[in-house]
Image: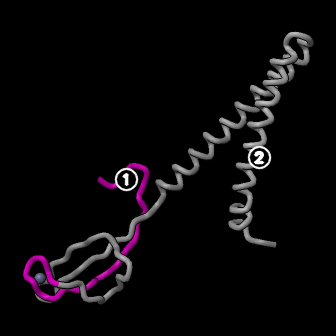
Amino acid sequence: MSGKGKEYSFLLPLYFMLLGVIIVLSGALLIMGLKASGENTLDATIYTTLGVAGFFFAFYSIQEARKRMKLLKKKKGRIMTVIKCKKCNHVYEREFKEGDYVYKNAGDCPQCGGNSFIFLIYAFREDKKGIT
Ligand SMILES: [Zn+2]
């Protein structure tokens, strides 16, 4: 038995494949409906209705997937690095860079030119409104 996360990543391409099949089938049904419209009106109505319903289902599913992806992006967090000067205690922060760690030398202080170091690193989650 595999974990739920792995199952989900496996199901996602399958889900899109299924959507593709539904779209193709809906198109085929619509074509069949149009072809049958001259001869058999009942068949034509059934095919066309199924085709249109299939298209609506596919588009609705794509819209739902887009909404979920947008929500996931909004929940993305940020990591900040706080730098402190050894000489004048000036504190400032910037976005976390790869290789940052606490007590690492952070170069010259922008205020007095003294030695500064990484004082702390923290992460926070951006809410829906974001940070201005
Ligand atoms: Zn300083």
Q: Earlier in the sequence, mark 2 or mark 1?
A: 2
**Ligand 1 occupies quarter:** bottom left
Tell me the residue at 70%/55% (across/down).
Answer: 13
Depicted 58 relative to depicted 105: above or below: above
* Residue 87 percent coordinates (x, y): 12, 88
Q: Nearer the viewer, mark 2 or mark 1?
A: 2
Foreground of the two, 126 or 51: 51
* Residue 9 percent coordinates (x, y): 68, 62
Foreground of the two, 54 or 96: 54
Depicted 73 relative to depicted 86: above or below: above
Q: Name the amino acid type tagged 1.
A: Gly
Stretch of the chain drawn in magenta: 108-132
Depicted 73 relative to depicted 124: above or below: above
Mark on residue 18?
2
Q: Name the amino acid type tagged 2.
A: Leu
User: Does the Cβ of the disc 2 residue fall within 8 Å of ligand 1?
Assistant: no
Cα distance in 3D space between marks 2 and 1: 35 Å
- Is 119 inside the magenta-drawn segment? yes
Mark on residue 130?
1
